[in-house]
Image (cartoon, rainbow, N blue to C red):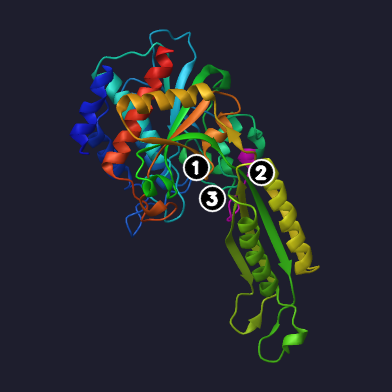
Amino acid sequence: MNAEAMRSEPSRINTPATNGDRLWADIVSTARFGAADKGGVTRLTLTEEDREVRDWYVAECRALGCTVEIDAIGNIFATYAGEDMSLPAIAAGSHLDTQPQGGRFDGILGVLAGVEILRTLKESATRLRHPLVVVNWTNEEGSRFSPAMLGSGVFAGAMALDDAQARTDREGVAVGAALDAIGYRGEATIDPASFAAYVELHIEQGPLLEASATEIGVVTGIQGLRWFDVAITGTEAHAGSTPMAQRDDALVAAAEIVLAVRDIAHQNPPGVGTVGFVEVGPNSRNVVPGSVRLQIDMRHPSETGLDQMQAALEDAVRKAGPGVALKHIWSKAPVVFDPTIVNAVRASTGALGYSATDMVSGAGHDAAHIATITPTAMIFVPSKDGLSHNEAEYTSPEECARGAEVLFQTILEIDRR
């Protein structure tokens, strides 16, 4: 389906339609902020590249007549006035930061679709009854500062502001200092109760929609996750002169834990487990490793499943030996989205004539935090080959346009209700 057809379909429900070509041009244009060698993006949160894309976003929203406010953790709220400013706002958005060598669609699609909706409202002289807020959340990825979803977590009250601002990256730079360095530590105080609803458009980051040739994922919830750090202490020794039977090899113990994480996930379907970070010391070819650090990510749609996976991991750590220490550093409980907002997504998708399926998100999103304080739902569009957090990440212009149109019609549906 071409972009022109995409724009003509929604006329069946007699509302303005977003411009898929214009949205795609923004996706291509904003990929220059942190452009990576293989066509992706490296735009870690609160870096100079993040400042550049934030500046672009703020300028675009102000040019469309929005009031732009920034809170103390750097979340950006662009408000387009509604007919009745006493009504709580309808919110949409996502994040502008990426993983190292990440893709051009993860996160930013939801923000750019919000900007495109603002343009559509302005050029069609359409006013919603409610104000519309498009949000960029700080540090969703967690690739520079831990934990992930930091900005939305502070907004939702899941983390104290002071604690969040004190978090440091690997170079020891604190979030607060990084905000100051790029000029995005704001002073606005946004009341979480001021949102009537929150809807987030995102790429699926998995293979299910593409495999089933389905156009839209109606997201009913997000699986829970737990993060763990493992520190393994062995004994550094000469690789040539130390007999195998007398070695205390930290990397061998680490390998056992890595395999255990894989096996635990297989034993607790549909859970998933990943060891995504390994640091070996002294990391020399001819030295038996004396220390290893691992970072583990475990996810499951149920709290019971997470409990079982954690118990199995703790058992694997005990079996790996006395030099292994496990630390549980962060959790996010499984989330069930608001049925009324989910139904609004279904109704809008059906009115547009797109194929759809209900699904639970495998990835974490800012919507997980916002759902604890505001009626929330998400919309997924397909990811080619299921790839994300990868420079090859791709969602076609037509797929992006469909997602933006479903987001817009969902906002209109919520506004009408």
At label 2, the amino acid type is Ser
Question: What residue is rendered at 68% in x and 41% in y?
Answer: 303
Q: Position of residue 378 (x, y in %)?
A: 46, 33
The residue wearing badge 2 is 331
Tell me which segment is drawn in magenta.
164-172
The residue wearing badge 3 is 144
Q: Are marks 2 and 3 in contact (CB under 8 Å)?
A: no
How many other residues sit within 10 Å of disc 1, few (<14), some (14-19) or many (≥20)? Answer: some
Question: What residue is rendered at 26% in x and 16% in y?
Answer: 14
At label 3, the amino acid type is Arg
- What secondary structure is marked by label 2? strand
Marks 2 and 1, the one that precedes in the sequence: 1
Regarding residue 243, the answer to whether it shows in the image is yes
303 to the left or right of 134:
right
Foreground tag (3 vs 1): 3
Instruction: Name the mark on residue 181.
Output: 1
